[in-house]
Image (spheres, helix red, strand yellow):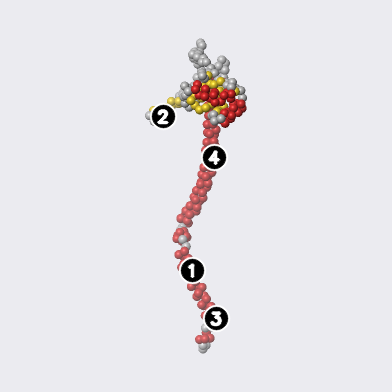
Amino acid sequence: MAKASEQFRQSDVTTWGIVALVLSAIAVMGANVSALMPRDLLAGLHKTRLEGASLDQLRLQVADLREEQLRLKRETGILTARFSLGEQQGNDITRRVGALEVSLPRLLETLPDGGNIDRNSLTAAIGQDPALVYQAEGGSVVVRHQPMAEAKPAVAGEQPLPAPVQQMAAIPMPNEQQFGIALGPSIPFEAAPEAWRDLSMKLGPLLFGLAPLLVEEANGDDQRIVVGPITQLSEATALCARLERMSVSCLPMPFTGTPLAY
């Protein structure tokens, strides 16, 4: 009889151990794969031929819905383009009508009044269509189109004119070709003769050949003494410079005013 050590070799144990491990791994994988698979997959595998055809029908319907969606997108793009084109045409019509409303009165003004022109032909496109009635809140709105009314003829006779304007005498303009010099400060009208006598005595020959005038101040009732005439403004300025060195206030100005009685 053979010994036990001779009946079981180490290679036999290794082979059967590997087989056992492989079978155990297959069993574990089979238990876990069933849990990871979708429920519908297992249910679909057990369905009959007629019940399984519904899945194919659903796929076909989904494909049809996708095609319908693409068609709707194309139609939406076409409608959007048409709407944009219609809006652009509406804006063009609005601008043309506005230009016509502005230019038509000007064209009517340029037409000759005595010309044999049928003004109704300007709006001949408007026919005698019945009035359009639109219902609105509280009643209705009636719209009638008719040709433009012709202007009434001018009334015979002379046109009344306004009363003639009364002519007024022209205000004499000052002779700005002649200059004078304003001497001294502003003084009352009553003190003007006495002030002129004082200036004549003080300045003497510097005022030889010059006549005095009284000029009213713009900002009051006082007067200033202006002597002249002096032909050149440069001469009046030079004379003022000499008088200012003598402590007499002086200012060149046009020789205008009221003669001073002294």
Between marks 2 and 3, how big is the CA–CA gap?
107 Å
Crowd rating for badge 2 (residues with CA inside 10 Å; few <14, some 14–19, many 20+): few
The residue under label 1 is 29
The residue under label 2 is 135
N-terminal of the pair, mark 3 or mark 1, is: 3
- At 52% from the left edge and 24% from the top edge, which residue is drawn? 198
* Amino acid identity at mark 2: Gln
Between marks 4 and 2, how big is the CA–CA gap?
33 Å
* Amino acid identity at mark 3: Ser
Q: Is residue 133 found left or right of 230 in the rendered image?
A: left
N-terminal of the pair, mark 2 or mark 1, is: 1
Crowd rating for badge 1 (residues with CA inside 10 Å; few <14, some 14–19, many 20+): few
Is the residue 180 above or below the residue 57 in the image? above
* Residue 81, disc: 4
Residue 70 placed where, x, y %? 53, 46
- At 48% from the left edge and 73% from the top edge, which residue is drawn? 24
* Amino acid identity at mark 4: Ala
Residue 21 placed where, x, y %? 50, 74
Q: Label 4 near label 3: C-beta < 8 Å?
A: no
- At 57% from the left edge and 27% from the top edge, which residue is drawn? 252
Between marks 3 and 1, how big is the CA–CA gap?
27 Å
N-terminal of the pair, mark 4 or mark 2, is: 4
Residue 67 placed where, x, y %? 52, 47
Q: Closer to the camera: disc 2 or disc 3?
A: 2
- Helix, strand, or loop for circle 2? strand
Q: Is residue 108 visible?
A: no
Q: Is residue 188 visible?
A: yes
The residue under label 3 is 11
Q: Label 1 near label 3: C-beta < 8 Å?
A: no
